[in-house]
Amino acid sequence: MLTYNFDDPQKPLYEQLYMYIKKDIEHGILLPDEHLPSKRSFAKNLGVSTITVENAYDQLMSEGYMYSVAKKGYYVADIKDKNKIVKAVRINSDIKLPEQAKDYLYDLSGNQINPDNFPFSVWARLMRETISSDKGALMTKSFCAGIKPIREAIAAHLYSFRGMAVDPAQILIGAGTEYLYGILLLLLGKDKLYCVENPGYKKIYQIYEKNGARCTFADMDESGITVEGLKSVKADVAHISPTHHFPTGITMPISRRYEILVWANEKKERYIIEDDYDSEFRLNGKPIPSLQSIDASGKVIYVNTFSKSLSPTIRISYMVLPVELANKYYKELSFYSCTVSNFEQYTLAEFIGQGYFEKHINRMRLHYSRQRNMVMDILKKNRLSEKCRVIENNSGLHFILQFETKKNDEELKRLFENKSIHMQPISDYYYKSSDIQHRFILNYSNIDKETLDEAFDIINRLL
């Protein structure tokens, strides 16, 4: 009769018995087709209840280690090739994790949001109200494009803030713009040639490329991407940021916008993806009208995110599809599930619908305006101002500092790194070598006022 000692008080008896028998089977102590004790006799021998043995046997049979024969009892199963698999006693993981972002004493090019600026109290209250008010809706699978309340709230916001008249059915909610780009590739086709701006946010290029799409880039002038550039690379889809280009800060003028729209209308398969990632933060004057709002032919796909306006960790983005593409999405891709939790969708819908989002944007616009003025004041009083020029367009959360120096960008980056200063040159965002040098990004969304003057002193000495 099999005998085991139960010496682990942290584990149930049936689990210990299950592990003992399993181990004996795997190590060949119990052989295939060997008859096992009956539950009653086994329980009596071990001094445990019959239920304990029954639970252990049930688990072993569920996993295929045992089988039963009616009126005959229980037997050891024949586990083929079990001796060919050698389980490592110690896990030896040879996994190379990507390099984590460094912690800098002076982070002047970071794009993080100050956590003190997030409306935690309002968000928490709305989340509690959402959970208590309609539990059934929270537990109901979301519509493929996102719940109706959030799409209606976004449509109303776009109309009041951006002058965009869109049907909520045109809006598609997704967990981050990366997911939305993947959906666009399925809608437009990976055979199309996608063109991004040079310089530009390289992650967009990487997403297209890793998704198997053909991707290229076109150079920009002082007004943004050019039609000549799009034609020269034979692009089908132009991915652009006309309101506030990153990293140059260029705002595309109305004449260039119409030129791009005319280019898109020349061929049926051409489209424009308008990336409007931080349009809320134009600090002076009214917001620039979106390219989508002047599109009369259904050629512009509008993409935006709450990463800048609320927090990068919210992971909620959306796009407005032209009617033709919206119909194609619902016909061909509606089997895709919405990737944003119902809890966040309903909470954000209330946050927008009750006016808190507009209040938050107004408050943050004032805050960032003060931040920008603070940075400018400190710079003007610092000797570094004699060795640099500010390039900006009063939009977004960053501007450019052009340094007067003979050192190249790589040398400057290395010098800054050695002093624990993070400043990113625009030259890093070009897809090919560029003559543009000495222009560095200064992002003031979460800049440390207390150490800024000290950072400017160090940069001045390095120059």
Image (cartoon, rainbow, N blue to C red):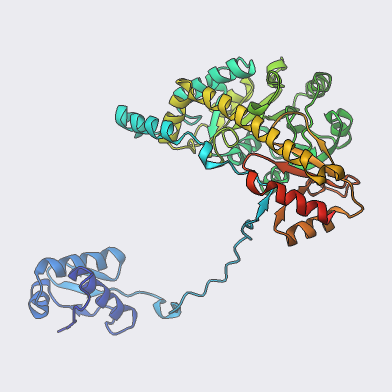
Question: Where does the image place residue 231, in percent across and percent down from the top left?
Answer: 87, 32
| Left or right: where 232 falls relative to 163 | right
Which image quadrant is residue 419 in? bottom right
Q: Residue at x 45, y 78 (%)?
A: 90
Name the foreground residue: 346 vs 56. 346
Count of labels in the image: 0
Residue 140 is at least partly visible in this image: no
| Left or right: where 411 falls relative to 145 | right
Question: Where does the image place residue 109, in percent across and percent down from the top left?
Answer: 70, 46
Question: Where does the image place residue 363, in percent across and percent down from the top left?
Answer: 56, 27
Name the foreground residue: 335 vs 406. 406
Depicted 138 relative to depicted 383: above or below: above
Residue 407 is at least partly visible in this image: yes
| Left or right: where 463 falls relative to 126 | right
In this view, the residue farthest toward the front is 381
Which image quadrant is residue 278 in? top right
Depicted 454 relative to depicted 301: above or below: below
Question: Where does the image place residue 348, in percent across and percent down from the top left?
Answer: 46, 29
Where the N terminus falls, by quadrant? bottom left
Depicted 415 relative to depicted 93: above or below: above
Q: Residue at x 63, y 56 (%)?
A: 101
Which image quadrant is residue 205 in? top right
Name the foreground residue: 399 vs 319. 399
Depicted 66 relative to depicted 441: above or below: below
